[in-house]
Amino acid sequence: MDGTFARAYFDANRDAVLEEWFTLLKLPTMGADPRRLGDCARAAAGLKHFLRPLGFEVEIMTAEGAGLPVPVVFAERQGERTGMTVLFYGHYDVQPEDPLTEWQTPPFEPTLADGRVYARGAQDNKGQMMGFLMGVRAMVEAGEPLPTLKVVVEGQEESGSEVLSALAHALAPRLQADVLMACDTSCGPDGRPAIVAGLRGVQHFTVTLEGPSHDLHSGVHGGVAPNPAQGMARLLASLHNADGSIAVKGFADLVEPPTAEEHERASASASSEEQYRAEVGCPPAGGAQGEDAVTRGSFQPTIEINGIHSGYGGPGSKTVIPAAAVAKLSMRLVPRQVPSETFAAVKKHLEARCPRGMRLTLSDACRGAPGFRLPLASPVFRLAADVLGQMDGRGAVFRWEGASIPVIATLRHISGAAPLLVGFGREEDKIHCPNESFGLDQFTQVMTWASLMLSALAE
């Protein structure tokens, strides 16, 4: 098998491949939304229908007492060779489509234009996941030997993986594997393939400040009634020092800086300031001053404000003192930080600074999972680098992703497998944003990676 195998399969079966992918993309599978449980169930059933003809034994599972019963797909196929056992992880849930008015095409009507598919989930993670599974199908239909392959696909990665986390310990004997593969990350900024050697963890919650029982006239009550919008602004500003560093006591005490080799390799795969500005529309000026962007984005924790709402935001003016203010916060964690401790530190900080005359509540809390970093000398990394070198003569780079796949840490611990995170996302894909897309060239790259790496692991 060579690097042209998967592309030839895609070209010969283009309509069928796109139909499978598009069928999944049409489902608005927001795993945190009770109204979308039916769509999540249809996605799980579709994946079962896809995997069974390939020789997989497939189960659809939920967990009692784990909130919304969003289904998890577990499948297993015995390999033709007794080489490595591979556990592949993916997710079919997606971010909400908001703001809908900024989409140029309907988010759940996949649209192919100029070699790119536009839809919510086109890349994250329905595109990369289906690319990997299509690579598996191409191998099975061609009679190519595969290692024993286990597949876990969930519907809550974007909201905390509650069901899969609840199921994981009970599934532990069945999840045992040598390698844990996931395609939910990005390539290097110049398009070179990238091996992810570390991920930050994540946790998030909603903060609500309440003042008066209803909106008040700002002329009659201004200067007398407490203003939740002003209070929220002060409260959120207190999370950081003037230099951008985190001001929450106890939050970042255990941060472990990168080694010289880690920093050097991460810098080699990082965007320049000019590239970043061109891709994002602003300079890399966030975070603590005095640290370079590589350190801030890959090896340090963050506290970010994801959204704020209070009072009136429409055209013209409406002179009110709002009754409440709401903010969404998320924290990215690095190794040695303990999620329960960082969550408690932020909670204590906010409660101690609740503005006078107001009530503070925290809700929608997800305490999340820790971050991790992997040893660069891993034998699996060496094998992956060889395979990626076949795909791109420039070879692979290493990245430490600032983003998070929280359940990877759990699956790594329970399965005993060595994580191997290689993805083909690009900044232009606009994941989590309006007009998300994924190129057909990227889709076939994932297929190629799956077929070449699984072939190597079967030997």
Image (spheres, helix red, strand yellow):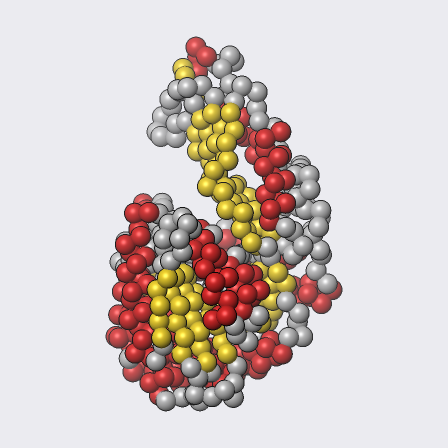
**Residue 303 drawn above or below residue 406:** above
Residue 187 visible in the picture: no
**Residue 312 drawn above or below residue 386:** above
Residue drawn where x is 35% and y is 68% of the image:
59
Tell which of 166 and 202 is nearer to you. 166
Residue drawn where x is 47% and y is 88% of the image:
81
Residue drawn where x is 50% and y is 70% of the image:
173
Across and down, in percent, residue 386 comes to 57, 82
Across and down, in percent, residue 19 comes to 26, 70
Tell which of 293 and 448 is nearer to you. 448
Going by the image, does 201 lie left or right of 99? right
Across and down, in percent, residue 409 comes to 56, 61
Residue 251, quarter of the rendered image? top right
Across and down, in percent, residue 143 comes to 37, 89
The quadrant of the picture occupied by the N terminus is bottom left
Tell which of 424 and 112 is nearer to you. 424
Q: Residue furthest top?
A: 220
